[in-house]
Structure formats: structure tokens, C-alpha cells
Image (cartoon, grey):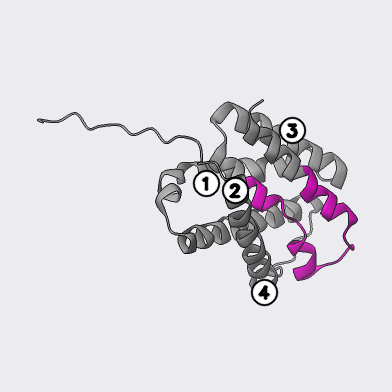
Amino acid sequence: MNGSFRRLLGLAFVAWGIRAAGPDGFGVWALGTNLLAAVTIQAGLRLEPWPMGFWILAVGLFWDATTFSALGHHAVVMGLIALTVRTQRGWWMVASAGEQIAGAILASVSFFVLDRILHELEVRSWAWPFSLSVALVVAGGVNGLVSWGMGTWLGRKPAQVRSYRMAGGR
């Protein structure tokens, strides 16, 4: 296993520990303690496809088993967000800190909305509109800032972006 994979695995388990040790709250506090979105963003930026897929399955299934969610629920959310972030990593590598934070906030809010929709379907209780406004935006903001901090702490450049030259008349 490479260093990024191990670090991201460790960060995912730290996020789980914070969630497990934290109070069983609702709204902003409950979403703010779920730092899995921040770690998932970094996994999308730093891991190659196969290690990223393995990381998503291992962490997602562990998270589902320990939070009594439907098996695969978190793996689906993590996979979709990590894949979306991965498609944007070329932009992410050259973006300013402010742009990276804004991208991480958008990805985190998307993570929480998707997680909430799947949770609502899982328990067959559609409480629309759920606390989209304040709770999800604050949690997305917290996780976006934390994700940027994690990226700075990890220090390595994200996975290499392949550039393809257009075949032309040069």
C-alpha cells in the first residue's frame, strides 16, 4: 500500500471515531461531526482508480456496518463523490486555495444531500424538505475547510493527471 492510501485509511477511521464518540445530535452538529466527506474528497484527488475503489469499498462497508446503515449506502455516496472529484483533479491541482475550498464545500454539500436522500429512501420516510438550508451548508463548509486542511497536511500532489496532446498539424 502506498503512503496516501494508508493515511487516508487512517483519516477515515479517525473521522469514524469522532462520529462514534460525539454526541448523538441532529442538525448542524450531527452533520458537522461526519468528516467522512472531507476524507472522501482527498481520496478522489490522491488515489489512482483501483486503490480508490478498494478504499471506497473498505471504508464504505465498514461505515455501513458500524452505523447500521444499509450495506453499500455509504460506499455508493463515497464512490459518486470521489469519482466526481477525481474527474476535476486537473483543475484542482492548479486552483487557488479559495477555489479549492469552494470546490470542497460544493463536494461536501453534495455528499450530505446524496447521503440524506439515500437515508430517507432506506428508512422509507421522506421528510422533504429536510434540513437542506442551514445544516447541510454549514456541514459542507466545515468539511470543505477540513478537506483543504487535510490536503495541505497530506502535502503530496494529487494523483498525476495525464495530459493528451491533440493530434494536429504541428
Q: Please indicate whether residue 66 sits to the left or right of residue 33 in the image.
A: right
Q: Which class describes the residues within 10 Å of circle 3: few (<14), some (14-19), or many (20+)?
A: few
| Residue drawn at (61%, 33%) of the image | 52
Query: Residue 90 lies in what quarter of the image?
Result: top left
The amino acid pointed to by label 3 is Ala
Q: For numbered disc 1, what is the local secondary structure?
A: helix
**163, above or below 37, in the image:** above
**On-image quarter of the C terminus:** top left
Q: Quick check: marks 2 and 1 in contact, CB under 8 Å?
A: yes
Q: Please indicate whether residue 104 sits to the left or right of residue 28 in the image.
A: left
Q: Which residues are magenta?
A: 13-41
Q: Earlier in the sequence, mark 1 or mark 3?
A: 3
The amino acid pointed to by label 2 is Ile
Residue 41 tag number: 2
The residue tagged 4 is 134
**On-image quarter of the N terminus:** top right
Point out the frontmost of discs 1 and 4: 1
Q: Earlier in the sequence, mark 3 or mark 2?
A: 2
Q: For numbered disc 4, what is the local secondary structure?
A: helix
| Place of residue 97 in the rendered image (x, y in percent of width and height, measured from the top left) | 48, 60
Q: Earlier in the sequence, mark 2 or mark 1?
A: 2
Q: Earlier in the sequence, mark 4 or mark 3?
A: 3
